[in-house]
Image (spheres, rainbow, N blue to C red):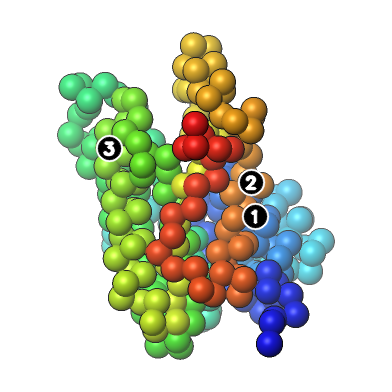
Amino acid sequence: MPVENPFSLHGRTAVVTGGGRGLGVGITESLLAAGADVVVLARRPLDETLTAYAHGLGRSVSLVELDLADPAAIATRVTELLTSTRVDILVNNAGLQIRHPAAEFPLHEFDAVLNVNLRAVFDLCQRFGAPMLERGHGKIINIASLTTYQGGLNVPAYAAAKGAVGQITKSLCNEWSARGVNVNAIAPGYMDTDLNEALIADPVRSEQISVRIPAGRWGTPADIGGAAVFLASAAADYVHGVTLPVDGGWLSR
C-alpha cells in the first residue's frame, strides 16, 4: 500500500552540518517544513529568524557547536548527541572552499579543504550510520558538487574532495542499502550563496556561467532543500547511491 504522504518527515530528527547559513538554511527550513526536527552542527550561533521559523511550525531547531576541522571535537560532540537523540537523517552539507591556481595551491590549504569536505564527511557517515544500521533504517545525504563531475577552475582541492564524496556515496550504498540505510548525494549547480561570492563578483566569469544555465538563473538554498526532503523521505526509499544534480540543467548543456 502506498504511504499516505510519502514526503512527510513528521516524527523524524535530522542533523544538518552547516545548517545555519547558505545552502544549509534552505535545507534546514525545508526539513522543518516537512515535519522534521533539526539539529544543526555549526561553528556559529543560529540566526533568530531560523529559530522563529521552526517555532512557528511547531518544530524544534537546535545547535551543537562544532568545528568540522577538529576530529577530536567531532568524536566528542557526536557521541554526546547520539547518547540523547535518535537521529534519522544526516545531511553532510558544511564545506570549505579555497581558490588558487593549481600550480600555486599551498599544500596546507589543500589538506584543510580535504579535512572538512571529505574526511569529516566520512567520519560523520560512520558515526551517525552505525545506529541507523542497528535500527535498520536511516537516510544519509551528502552534498556533492558539479565538481563531482567536472574539474572546475582554481579549485583542485575542492574538486578532489567532491569527486571523492560521490564515490563514498556509492561505496556506502553498496554496503548499507540492503541494511535499510539510504545513502545518496545532491550535486548543487551554481548557487547564489556566500560560498560563490568570488564568482558572483567576477563579471566575466559570472556571465560565462549564467549564459550556460538552461534555467536562466543561479540556484537558491530552497532549490536544494526540496531535493533534500525528497531523499530524506519515504518517497526515496528505493533510491540508493545516486548523486542528484540540482543545477538548472547545467550538466545537460
Numbered disc 3: secondary structure = helix
Real-space CA distance between mark 3 and mark 2, rounded to the nearest whole angstrom: 25 Å
In the rendering, at what x and y percent does residue 158 appear?
Answer: 33, 39
Mark seen at residue 21: none
Give the image quarter of residue 129.
bottom left
Label 1 close to label 3 by CB (< 8 Å) = no
Does residue 105 show up? yes
Numbered disc 1: secondary structure = helix
Real-space CA distance between mark 2 and mark 1, rounded to the nearest whole angstrom: 6 Å
Q: Nearer the viewer, residue 82 or 134?
A: 134
Which residue position holds label 1? 226
Which residue position holds label 2? 223
Mark closer to the observer (3, 2):
2
Q: Amino acid at mark 2?
A: Asp
Does residue 21 show up? no
In the rendering, at what x and y percent does residue 227 appear?
Answer: 59, 55
Q: Amino acid at mark 1?
A: Gly
Give the image quarter of residue 82.
bottom left
